């Protein structure tokens, strides 16, 4: 995760927040000691963090955290990661978006750093069961029916098997779990999990997973305004008939790794953000556009096209420029793996 906020309410909690922040250059401490400041600004603070999908760590009582975030909890596929730590540094508890938002992973990482115990409560993790949302995240798949996640998990937790349908040529590693029953593709009837690009059969599963197979390569002027960047990318994808939700990776050059418009675009869309050095980009294979100006500034003659290919794609749409932004699109040959 590129950034997170640490919220504390007491002097002792603030001291723990500073300890965590000291080892993470991308964290920010926000202490709410003053009651008036807390009442006046907390709503705006949390609204912005949920909008930007910035992970939040509360150092304090779980009840306080639950009450504060309650108005903003909306969609398990889009909610930001929320974690609670006690100010005694005993426990790290993910309370929202444990899987898709990465709260469980962040909690384990924090526990290792601070010496606290990570308290993971998601049933599939506790029982070592297949988690369809984590499977989707790991394999760059879009979840179409979020309500079906609980249905699939309930079957497994009750000791039953689930049916999965996917073209076998798209599977790089078959499941070792005996409770995952692979059935024919396309399915003859309704299945529990369907992995497909075919819109005609999207409704034949409790959970349909669609490959996020597009890679967006992008470059921009330094400190590009987020709204302008977003508008250009929205136009670029629309003009080329690409569903934004099927973009699984945003890729650029490493000198753009801290560019806010790129970071925020990817985070708000739960999209992987990757950057490459000019040396790595120069090794991308393909017929790319050439700009001597870009070469002078970055050390490579093209950023967006090369970055899209470097992230594992085949160039589909060449460089388009406007408003201080460049964009290109690649497509990857997707496959899924059932084991990590």
Image: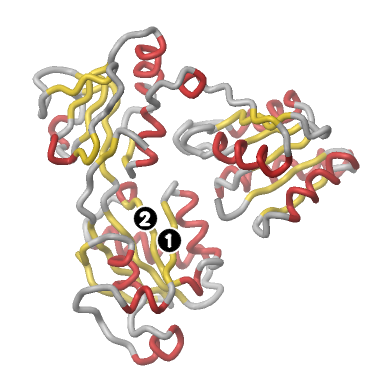
Q: On screen, 21 above or below 112?
A: below
Q: How crowded is mark 1: few (under 14 residues within 10 Å), some or many (20 or more)?
A: many
* 295 displayed left or right of 202: right
Residue sitting nearer the eye, 133 or 118: 118
Q: Name the residue under label 2.
A: 249
Q: Which of 128 and 184 is in front in this view?
A: 128
Circle number at residue 149: none
Report whether residue 72 is seen.
yes
* Residue 264 coordinates in the image, percent (x, y): 52, 57
What SS does tag 2 mark?
A: strand
Which percent across, then down, holds residue 185? 11, 29
Relative to 296, does residue 237 appear above or below in the rendering?
Answer: above
Residue at coordinates 38% horizontally, 41% vertically from top-left?
A: 138
Secondary structure of the residue carrying tag 1 is strand
**Dividing the picture into quarters, in which one does residue 242 lie?**
bottom left
Q: Is residue 82 left or right of residue 209?
A: right
Q: In which quarter of the image is the C terminus?
A: top left
Q: Which residue is drawn at 64% across and 49% down?
A: 4
Specify how the rendered protein is coloured: secondary structure
At 66% from the left and 29% from the top, the residue drawn is 93
- For disc 1, the marked residue is 274
Number of numbered discs visible in the structure rendering: 2
Mark sitting earlier along the chain (1/2):
2
Left or right: 305, with 57 as reference point: left
Location of residue 213 in the rendering, given as x and y in whole percent from the top left corner: 26, 50
Q: How crowded is mark 2: few (under 14 residues within 10 Å), some or many (20 or more)?
A: many
302 vs 125: above or below: below
Q: Are marks 1 and 2 in contact (CB under 8 Å)?
A: yes
Residue 78 location in percent, x, y?
48, 38
């Amino acid at each position: 995760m590129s950034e997170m906020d640490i919220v504390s309410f007491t002097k002792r909690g603030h001291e723990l927040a500073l300890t965590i922040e000291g080892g993470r250059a991308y964290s920010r401490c926000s202490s709410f000691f003053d009651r008036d400041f807390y009442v006046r600004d907390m709503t705006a603070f949390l609204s912005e963090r949920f909008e930007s999908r910035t992970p939040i760590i509360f150092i304090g009582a779980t009840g306080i955290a639950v009450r504060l975030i309650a108005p903003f909890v909306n969609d398990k596929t889009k909610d930001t990661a929320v974690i609670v730590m006690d100010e005694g540094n005993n426990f790290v508890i993910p309370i929202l978006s444990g899987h898709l938002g990465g709260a469980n992973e962040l909690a384990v990482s924090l526990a290792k750093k601070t010496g606290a115990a990570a308290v993971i409560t998601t049933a599939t993790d506790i029982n070592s069961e297949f988690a369809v949302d984590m499977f989707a995240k790991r394999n760059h798949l879009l979840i179409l029916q979020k309500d079906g996640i609980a249905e699939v998990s309930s079957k497994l937790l009750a000791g039953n098997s689930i049916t999965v349908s996917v073209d076998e040529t798209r599977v790089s590693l078959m499941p070792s779990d005996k409770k995952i029953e692979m059935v024919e593709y396309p399915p003859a009837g309704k299945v529990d999990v369907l992995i497909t690009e075919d819109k005609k059969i999207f409704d034949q599963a409790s959970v349909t997973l669609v490959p996020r197979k597009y890679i967006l390569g992008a470059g921009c002027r330094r400190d590009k305004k987020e709204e302008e960047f977003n508008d250009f990318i929205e136009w670029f994808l629309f003009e080329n008939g690409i569903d934004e939700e099927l973009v699984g990776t945003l890729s650029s050059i490493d000198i753009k790794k801290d560019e806010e418009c790129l970071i925020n675009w990817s985070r708000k869309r739960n999209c992987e953000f990757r950057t490459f050095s000019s040396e790595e980009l120069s090794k991308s294979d393909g017929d790319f556009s050439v700009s001597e100006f870009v070469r002078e500034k970055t050390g490579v003659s093209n950023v967006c096209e090369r970055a899209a290919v470097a992230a594992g794609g085949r160039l589909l749409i060449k460089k388009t420029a406007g408003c201080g932004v460049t964009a290109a699109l690649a497509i990857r040959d997707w496959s899924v793996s059932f084991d990590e």
